[in-house]
Image (spheres, rainbow, N blue to C red):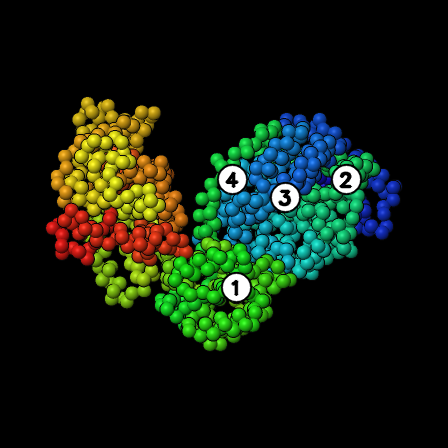
Amino acid sequence: MNICQLCNLFLLKKNKFKNSIFGVVIILKTKIRYFTYNQNHKTSLMKKQLLIFILIFLNLFLFAQEPITLNSWANQVLDKMTLEEKIAQLLVIRIHSNFDESYNTKIVADIEKYQPGSVCFFQGGPKREIALTNRIQSVSKIPLLVAMDAEWGPSMRLDSLPRFPRNMTLGALDSKYDTLIFEVGKEIGIQCNALGIHVNYAPVIDVNNNSKNPVINSRSFGENKYWVVRKGLAYMNGLRSAGIVPCAKHFPGHGDTEVDSHLGLPVITKSKKELADTEFYPFTKFIEQNVEMIMVSHLNIPALDSAKNSIATLSYPIVTQLLKNEMGYQGIIVSDGMEMEGLRKFYKNGAEAEILCLLAGVDQLCLPNDMSVIIPEIKKAVENGIISEAQINEKCLKILKLKEQKGLTQFTPLSTDITSWFNFEKTNQLIQKIETKALTLLTNKEGIIPITNRTYTAALIFGDPETTPFCIELCKAQKIPYFVLDKQINPAESQRVLNKLSNYQNVIVIYTNTNQNPSKQYGITPASVQYIEQIAKYKKVILTLFGNPYSLEQFKKIDHLSAVIIGYQRTQYSVASTLDGIFGKIRFEGFLPVSTLIFKSGTNYYTNTSSRENTSLLSKKEEQIIDSIALSGIQNKYYPGCQVLAIKNGRTIFKKSYGFLSYDQKIAVNEKTIYDIASLTKITSTTLAIMKLYEEGKIGLKDPVEKFLPFFVGTSVGKLKVDELLTHTSGLPAFIPFYTKLNSDSIRYLYVNDIQNENFTIPVANNMYLHKDFPQIILSEIKNCKLNGKRYNYSDLGFILLKEIVESIVQISIDQYVTEIFYKPLGMYNTIYNPIVKKLDIQRIAPTENDAQFRMQTVQGYVHDQTAALFGGIQGHAGLFSNTEDLGILFTMLLRGGEYSGKRYFKESTVKMFTSSYAINNCSVRGLGFYTPSHLEQSEI
């Protein structure tokens, strides 16, 4: 509670003293302001004594009238602390984990001696940071509040961690993808938790409306204040969901500056009305959401504080009168780094800046001067009446209460085993999805995108040692010729490339050699711009720029280009997805978050190539034919709903969803609905696994079953060959109805239970679990089954055996194997075994049947095939769930000879061999796992 709040409380309780108390408040405010902003005329000792007398008298009087009960841990701790300890709690000390042991020893000793309340970690590594955190926490009487400036994740400071996109990339996302920003905040929060970090100095909610801003810029969500709020809140709520304290920054708004406050003091000349309309707006909305911390920045804003060289961090009118009183903020106010030149230019040594900062209303001093200097100096200021101990108590109590809320009443050492916390695969998937969804197409003259004929298309790469190699590989994967130039432009080499480009109509410029520095033109060289403009005189140029969208300002003749795409991030994900978009595989969905050159904020040029719900490049007549077929099936009750996808030459030409998940018509089918794909499991899972193992030399087509499965040694089934199983020519029966064995009450009693426990481990259906030994009974029956001659007979049993073989080789489940090797890297996020067991939303899963024979329930999210169900839903012949979008990706990869989006999954020769007709046992209708319809007339089926 500050002095003004105490006065207000007193006025409510003691109305008869209203006039005299009001006079005291005016005197107090006047003298503090006089001390703060008239440094050339220092306040006299008499004035200081008068201040302390008024303050102490008023505080004692009010506390006598309004006793405070001290019950909480925070209050109890505060009551026992010395003045030095209270002051130390207000400090946030810089700390690194990448220095030598002498540094570590000193920092531990300093923390043990001075007992600061918080630390802020900078450069280092995850395990080193955890180890150092454990050391400093062990010497802290009151556990430290650990912070990090981790706007795009701890990777902003630490090595070995995935780097999340900057805010401007998040700002480019369509609002329907704001859930991805929540996930970013959550994932960053999870990483912070693992590292022992409690506070993330994020999000940045500055509205960046100045393209020359050297310090905020791409750290902002953009120039639209409403977008900044919406996306900033999503990020903040993600952090909160992981238990991390967010900090909104940089009040009152750092988005319209041309000076980096790390290097100097920025001046903002806007009126208070202009600031309130734009800069204050995000902070107002965050205050409404009770943001736990707000960081005040080192800014000179004459409209808010007219004192010469006033700095927002040290300004009572800005921190207390505006932020606390006018805007009603009651949380913790933290200074921007006190070591920054925007402040230290005026306050070099000692503790004067720190004292002024506390007087202004700031609670936490981030990165102050040396503790050995400022703690005694602040104490002296209290003893001399410049600051009251009540003010120190109020600030300290805020910090202690936050620690209490975060469970920091005592510290539990952190584990250095971070693998249980970090799921890098999941994180990378999220990053890839965001970078893809953010891609922004700004112009598309004559509909050049999507390019349907690659014959006359080449790529020109302006890269650097980090990005050029993967750009080359991606061009190779897309089967387009490429040329590489240094952005400084060597005349001889550039002429050679120019001559080569004469053979092509379309030139895709891939510009990845960029940076985030506006003073260096974001890495764009005039020579490269001139060269691109020269090419554009004769060719159709598609400029793909990977970096800051403000870098477009270097291209003064941008209207001469046929298409312009902003990729935001200099990553393989962004480049690969951009090329996919150019060639029609995906849709460009991002929006420009800032205005630049001729393009206004919010610019977006959609293409018709896409992952949209319904997509068509067909004629109306062709669409009507497909619609009539799909709807006829629904009307005749062959199915309640379906998905249809058509891809030609790697391009989606038709995609549409029809009907509902079930006949009750409650949930409509959409592009994310998944279906039990039954026997497609044979090729989308088992055959893929066999192909990969064959290519790696771990399995041969003529290898017998018994080579991999000792259980089958000495049996006729054990002698069956891998190629016989793949082509269904082994003589195995089509299937065996194993589930009928459980129709007997006595058998069912032994092997089926409605509760999962250590014996009944296998989920078969809702509230139905099978005994863990039952799969072995099935394998025993397969082992002893009678073969019916080496001829074609489509068999599930062969693929059950193939699944067992795969798992014997890779030593993990086939589910895990195909997911890690194929589905995740391909982006097939809708392809999954056991979706209901893995907690997928049931409203996304189409039910398959009302099972009145075996499971006695509607089967939804569990595999339809009874035999696969008896194995827990994971089998080689059935069990997989997917949708048309994912299957389209997989089969496009196979049609491309094993390559997709720049990554090769198979040699082209492997795909050709497995998908070609394979003559064996008088059958030529089958490939290896695949059906070859061109030979249908030769089949006896």
Horizontal and vertical percent for residue 272? 67, 57
Disc on the earlier residue, 1 or 4? 4
Which numbered circle lies on residue 374?
A: 2
Q: Position of residue 218 (x, y in %)?
A: 57, 56
As drawn, the label of residue 190 is 4
Q: Amino acid at mark 3?
A: Phe
What is the three-letter code of the residue carrying label 4?
A: Ile
Considering only vertical position in the picture, is 558 above or below 754?
below
What residue is rendered at 37% in x and 55% in y?
900
Circles 3 and 1 in contact, beta carbons < 8 Å: no
Between the residue at mark 3 and the residue at mark 2, the CA separation in whole angstroms equals 22 Å
> Which residue is pictured at 31% across the width and 49% down the height?
883
User: Which quadrant of the structure image shows residue 52?
Assistant: top right
In the image: residue 328, left or right of residue 434? right
Q: Confirm whether residue 120 shows in the render.
A: no
Cα–Cα gap, marks 2 and 4: 35 Å
> Residue 122, which numbered label?
3
Q: CA distance from mark 1 to mark 2?
A: 51 Å
Q: CA distance from mark 3 to mark 4?
A: 18 Å
Say which element carries label 3.
loop
Q: Which of the two discs, 3 and 4, sits closer to the camera?
A: 3
> Which circle's residue, 3 or 4, is located before the other in the chain?
3
Tag 2's secondary structure? Answer: helix
Task: Identify residue for label 1.
Answer: 462
Q: Residue at coordinates 41% horizontally, 56% vertically from top-left? A: 902
Question: Residue 573 appears at what percent x and percent y?
Answer: 46, 54
Question: Given the image, on which type of amino acid does mark 1 rest?
Answer: Phe
Q: Are marks 1 and 4 in contact (CB under 8 Å)?
A: no
User: In this picture, is 546 found above or below 840?
Assistant: below
Whichever of callouts 3 and 1 sits on the residue coming sooner in the sequence is 3
